[in-house]
Amino acid sequence: MIVLGAALVIVGLLLALIAAAGLLRLQDIYLRVQAASVGSLGVVAILLASVGTGNGRIITRALLVATFLLLASPVSAHAITRAAWLRRVKLRSGGRWDETGTLAKPPTPLPSGRPKK
Amino acid sequence: MSEIFLDAALLALGVFGWSVLHTVARDVDIATKVLAVDLLGVLLCGVAALLAYLTGSEHYLDIGLVLALLAFAGTLSPAQVIATGRLFSREEDR
């Protein structure tokens, strides 16, 4: 069990390294969101490494946090990418891979701060 | 898991968190900044888990759970503000 825990910590650290390097190296938000999702998978691996401690209370809480992270990280990644897409953040390729063509159109106007009469 | 190994893992997570903080400070795109802050919160959750294994106390994982919840809320609300300009939609927007 100790060996399994150490191996899971190493796997989690490798995934976190991939996330940090991807956030530095990749160019636009649509590519970087992939790296950030890998980072939360790495933290889930570190949380699963609690089997190496053999402490039942630590394992229970770590599984709770891991479940929440697995549910929350796709939702937040989708929300931030959708926000960038609605504001028409440019692709690194300059529109060559914009299959739907919506990134070339102007963004939806922001609602004005003043309520309409 | 030995103490030296967990210390080295904590140091590595700190280095990765520092590079993510560099992205937060230097990037010009607001959505990328929000994404990097989210990743920073999740990495701090991993730091809390490693501290729990190091000390044998389960209370650090409560800190980790709160950090994960705050990272989730702290990503969804700026995403909504970036997308629509408002945190809550009103009747006249529809």
Image (cartoon, grey):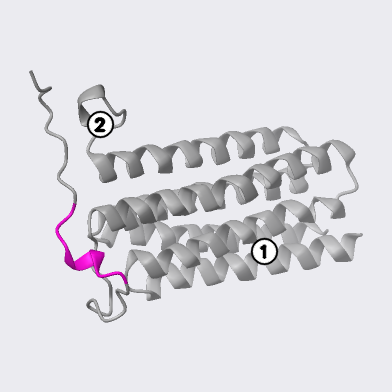
Q: Secondary structure at mark 2?
A: loop
What number of labels is visible? 2
Which residues make up the magenta segment? A100-107
What x and y, as percent, mark residue A70?
Answer: 64, 50
Q: Which residue is mark 1?
A: A12
Q: Which mark is residue B94?
A: 2
Q: Is residue A20 above or below residue A78?
A: below
Q: Quadrant of the N terminus of chain A?
A: bottom right
Q: Report the side of A55 relative to A32 (left or right).
A: right
Q: Nearer the viewer, residue B92 or B2?
A: B92
- Find residue A113 and report its image quarter: top left
Q: Nearer the viewer, residue A19 or B51?
A: A19
Q: Judge if badges 2 and 1 mark residues of a common chain.
A: no
Q: Report the side of B87 relative to A39 (left or right).
A: left
Disc 2/disc 1 C-alpha distance (Å): 44 Å
Looking at the image, which residue is at 51% across and 67% down?
A19
Q: Is A102 part of what is drawn in magenta? A: yes
Looking at the image, which residue is at 44% across and 59% down?
B18
Q: Secondary structure at mark 1?
A: helix
Q: Report the side of B18 relative to A15 (left or right).
A: left
Q: Residue furthest top?
A: A117
- Find residue A27 and report its image quarter: bottom left
